[in-house]
Image: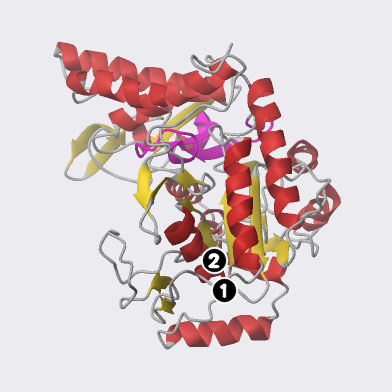
Amino acid sequence: MSTPGSPSGPPVPLAGDGMPVPCMDGAERPYLSMDAAASTGALPQVAARVAEFVPWYSSVHRGAGYKSQLSTCAYEDARAAAVAFAGRPPDGDDVAVICRNATEALNHLAYRLRLEPGDVVVTTVAEHHANLLPWSRAAACRHVECGRDGTFGAGDVEAALEQRPSPRLLAITGASNITGWMPPLAEITQAAHERGIPVVVDAAQLAPHRPLPAGADFLAWSGHKMYAPFGAGILLGPRRAFADGDPFLAGGGAVDLVDLDEVLWTAPPEREEAGSPNVIGAVALHAAIDTLTGIGWPALISHERRIAAALRRGLAAIPGVRLLGPGLDAETLPVATFTIDGVPHALTAARLAAEDAIGVRHGCFCAHPYLMRLLGYTREDVRRYRDQVRRGDRSAMPGAVRASAGINTTAEDVARLLAAVTRIADGSPPPVPYRQDPRTGDYHPRADSPRQLPWPQAHQAPCSPG
């Protein structure tokens, strides 16, 4: 099945694609988002479903009125759709807890697994902070190292699983948010299960691009990365993991009976969803799942393989550009992270935005240990940068530029990005001077520039913190 308006499947325009934005030469250009790895726009089907649902919105699970009953059905249908999207049977043991995003889901799980400080969690240096920090706060972490190209093999993970003490858990990414590289999850999961070790997969980057791994014990993913940016995500795992003990959040909706000295928690998944849930976010996520399922994985994957190849090969062919991560023959998601010789990453991103209306991400992408390895930095380098940040100076913060694509990206979009990067890399001077703010590390067209952009009001936070 294909999406209406796109007989052969992707690309599928998203809400807001092509909106004109101001550029430094005084012209307006259609905005090109190459930042899908951070967050995506909404699928038209998602936006339409939300608009359709909003008049019927009401509280769920407790209301007797018609709107409340309808909203409850919509919310629970979204939960069932998430279970099906993960490839799990509707009458199986797995439950879907509806959270804000994958970060909340992983923090939630780290709490619910009742880890002790002496427990060991095996994870990797390639993780997003969301799949590093919750585990290091709850237990001792054993990290799988990567090679210079940012990859590791199943054997590297097996070696970490074999060390003593035996780990309680393996927490691993489904795909890198910096390089788009996908670890061999099936082989890794099998190795963990042979040793009786459950597996958590951070699928935030993977979910909109590939089927979710069937063998994982726990999955976490976010709606805002899969064309449903309305604040809902999923934590999926076996019901028994949530059946005992107090939940991550305590409050209304998570209980059967409360007295001043006793609480009877209700059954999962409701036990894990205290407070008024994000019904609209759940409805949006359901619509995204339906749309992606309707397009089908073969069409999605075929499109993204073409875009990934054009993006990565095109950047690697530009003189002065260094593409980070595995070689060009490796299969990755449509994500390409790069540096330009002699041009700070923050300046590259600022110029792409102000001169070409192209939105990219720059910095460390919430995966500092991985990026430092990809850039080849030493511990001494990292210590020096840390000292500078402590002094409030981010002007020399390490980083790179990331261009990432999705269901809406066309070959023409990639060509437009490559032309802009080529112009920056060949030393062509900017049309106006740029000034760096040392507090944030970001660059902006100088205030005395003859051309002024009607940009949103500046803020003190850096464009790419964390």
Q: Which residue is more in the foreground, 195 or 94?
A: 94
Magenta stretch encompasses residue 218: yes
Label 1 crowd bin: few (<14), some (14–19), many (20+), radius 10 Å: many
Residue assigned mark 2: 348
Q: Which residue is more in the foreground, 159 or 18?
A: 18
Q: Position of residue 58 (x, y in %)?
A: 18, 23
Q: Which residue is more in the foreground, 158 or 455?
A: 455
Q: Given the image, on which type of amino acid does mark 2 rest? A: Thr
Q: Residue at x 58, y 56 (%)?
A: 420
Q: Residue at x 38, y 52 (%)?
A: 27
Q: Residue at x 58, y 74 (%)?
A: 398
Provide the residue span drawn in magenta.
212-241
Secondary structure beneath label 1: loop
Q: Given the image, on which type of amino acid does mark 1 rest? A: Pro
Left or right of residue 94, residue 303 in this image:
right
Left or right of residue 6, residue 49 in this image:
left
Magenta stretch encompasses residue 186: no
Q: What label sits on residue 344 in the rendered view?
A: 1
* Residue 399 visible at all: yes
Q: Residue at x 67, y 47 (%)?
A: 180
- Decide: is 391 above or below 460: below
- Quadrant assignment for the N terminus: top right
Q: Position of residue 303 (x, y in %)?
A: 66, 29
